[in-house]
Image (cartoon, helix red, strand yellow):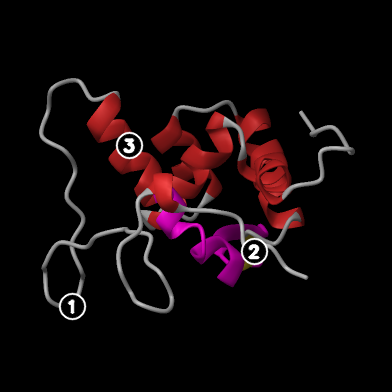
Amino acid sequence: MPSDPSDNDSISAALDVIGDRWSLLVLRAVFRRIYRFSDLRDDLGIASNLLTTRLCRLVDHGVLEKVRYQERPERFEYRLTDAGRDLSPVLVSLMQWGDAHRGDGEAPTVLAHADCGEPVENITRCTSCHTPVDAADIRKLETT
């Protein structure tokens, strides 16, 4: 559901694009290198009409791009754009939050750097002093 036009902030705008369960799960699948419609449908257990709607919205907003991989019959894959790849920290944060606060008692998911195999962390850091910043210490930067 679109946000109230008078509520013009970046979180509302982002939620208009990716703020529903299926869009986030589609993105998770594409990050896991599942690119084709039928593979996405099967992996997610989503109805074709819902998947079509979510893919069209993500393509229309520049999060995914449609790439033809077969001409006859015409078939497409859905690949992340730069804007889509920029959502990686968001999905990692959601996963970590789910592990910490909504988990079912299983060990948390550990993500590793593909090159060296070591765990990765997803933290908010000050651009000046590079200190990790807690949510309680973040303020909106006032511009003049």
| Disc 1 and disc 3 in contact, CB within 8 angstroms | no
Between 75 and 82, the residue placed more toward the observer is: 82
In magenta, the rendered stretch is 71-91
Characterize the local packing of mark 3: few (<14), some (14-19) or many (20 or more) Cα atoms within 10 angstroms: few
Can residue 32 be seen by looking at this rendering? yes
Q: Kindly identify the amino acid type of the residue bearing the numbered disc 3.
A: Trp
Disc 2 to disc 1, how far (Cα)?
Answer: 26 Å
Looking at the image, the residue that sits furthest to the front is: 144
Characterize the local packing of mark 2: few (<14), some (14-19) or many (20 or more) Cα atoms within 10 angstroms: many
Q: Residue at x 62, y 62 (%)?
A: 141
Looking at the image, the residue that sits furthest to the top is: 104
Residue 80 falls inside the magenta stretch: yes
**Disc 2 or disc 1, which is closer to the eye?**
1
Q: Secondary structure at mark 1?
A: loop
Between 110 and 62, the residue placed more toward the observer is: 110
Q: Kindly identify the amino acid type of the residue bearing the numbered disc 2.
A: Glu
Q: Residue at x 54, y 53 (%)?
A: 139
Between 136 and 21, the residue placed more toward the observer is: 136
Q: Secondary structure at mark 3?
A: helix
Residue 65 got which mark? 2
Residue 35 got which mark? none
**Disc 3 or disc 2, which is closer to the eye?**
3
Q: Is residue 104 left or right of residue 28?
A: left
The relative height of residue 27 versus residue 108 in the rendered view (above or below) is below
| Image quadrant in which you'd find residue 112 | bottom left
Residue 73 falls inside the magenta stretch: yes
Of labels 3 and 2, earlier in sequence is 2
Residue behind mark 3: 97
Residue behind mark 1: 115
Q: Is residue 109 left or right of residue 31?
A: left
Q: Residue at x 58, y 26 (%)?
A: 47
